[in-house]
Image (cartoon, rainbow, N blue to C red):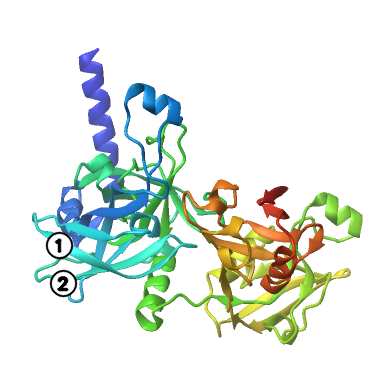
Amino acid sequence: MLKQTRIMLSLVALTFVTAGHAALPLAVDGQPVVSLAPIVEKTSPAVVNIRVSQTVAARQFGSDAFRRYFGLPDVPQGGTRQATSAGSGVIVDAENGYILTNHHVVDGADEIEIFTFDGRTLDATIIGSDERTDIAVIQVEADDLVEMPIGDSEAIRVGDFVLAIGNPFGLQHTVTSGIVSALGRMGISRGDTLEDFIQTDASINPGNSGGALVNMSGELIGINSAIISRSGGNVGIGFAVPTEIASSIMRQILDFGEVRRGLLGVTINPVDREVAETLNIPVDSGAIITSVAEGSAAERAGLEVDDVIVEINSKRIGNAFELVNTIGLMSPGEEVTIRYVRGERTRTTTAELGQRIAQSVLGEDIHPGLAGAEFSSSSTSGVRGIEVASVQDGSPASQRDIRAGDIITAANRRSVDSIAELSQVASGSNIVFLYIVRGDRTILRQIR
């Protein structure tokens, strides 16, 4: 049995080397690669361990009677505690000390410490962060840093070999290997996110977030971000934000201090077979326009209510989510080519995207029961309403099951299209019933 195992291992190794010399031209600095060690040695120094300290709301375990019986200390109302978490990051600009990581790794951080490959501990500051793409840029001040070159994530193919480098479970600079399993994955995360993930079977575990997905030329092609797992550990389904997106977000943060998103100026609904049959539409997928904003890019491009958008820049649009995602990852002023169906004909137009400008209001300014939430007047979900931009853990809004990404469409049975309309309804009532679109469901929440 042992002999058979050795033979099998030899065959696998031989197959890998043969593929490396034939179908897969693996090389670093022009030299053929028969081991992954040269790639690991080249890229690992650019990957850092991140430790985040933050203040969080303290939660009391058990009832007051339970705690008194067992002599447990009480936690004061509104009390806080210090919490730490870990993640990974990738140095992409050694001269300026810029590091790419995930938004969720550094979100809410009071202090950020960086542990480098050569054993140094450095303090880091957040330059900018974008929740919707889960990308953040942080910075350290240090000499002799090593950066990782950024590769072209658009050039990768399903089946390409990749490495994942990070700090899973606090085990610094762990390297795993695999292949690209799929491209363009969407709908993985919850809430109002913009996604175009690279899927890989390279092992990604807690602590890998923000780490590097590396191609066989030793270039960064993705920032490891999420996994699908019932147990919380790796099951061979991991996701990385492509460098095409991560680099764009980083450039906007460094150039403007914020992320500026394109805006088409339409509200939309998905088209499926049932909708197509009901409305006699000659396509059974796409996004049907339900309203066009006055003066918007869509209006200038000649788009109208009832038009069904089926392509953006030759990229198929299968549903409303894909349209929101595609436009949301583009920049203001970018010109896009739109294919759409009107009646029985398929037409083409071009539009210069506007800029999404959202008014933000704190929940406590609307109703005491919404304290801890932030609301945006600009919904990007394709649903007309008011978007919940963020919710603080443990806040009154969180306790009432208000979540980031929710779209409030009505209050006390009155449609609300603006924060002013919601505030008007809430100001005259101690109790407010909110009608909320969450994913593909509509739910009702009572706010006191």
Vertical comparison of 116 with 378: above or below: above
Report whether residue 211 is seen: no
35 and 194: which one is in front? 194
Vertical comparison of 17 with 46: above or below: above
Quarter of the picture holding the N terminus: top left
Q: Position of residue 297 (x, y in %)?
A: 68, 83
Residue underneath mark 1: 122
Q: Position of residue 339 (x, y in %)?
A: 72, 72
Helix, strand or loop for disc 2 = loop
Left or right: 311, with 128 as reference point:
right
Residue 252 quadrant = bottom left
Helix, strand or loop for disc 1 = strand
Residue underneath mark 2: 141
Left or right: 10, with 417 as reference point:
left
Q: Residue at x 47, y 40 (%)?
A: 228
The residue carrying pointer 1 sits among few (fewer than 14), some (14 to 19) or many (20 or more) residues within 10 Å by Cα, namely some
Q: Residue at x 38, y 22 (%)?
A: 69
- For marks 1 and 2 on the same chain, the one whose residue lies earlier in the sequence: 1
30 and 281: which one is in front? 281
Q: Are marks 1 and 2 in contact (CB under 8 Å)?
A: yes
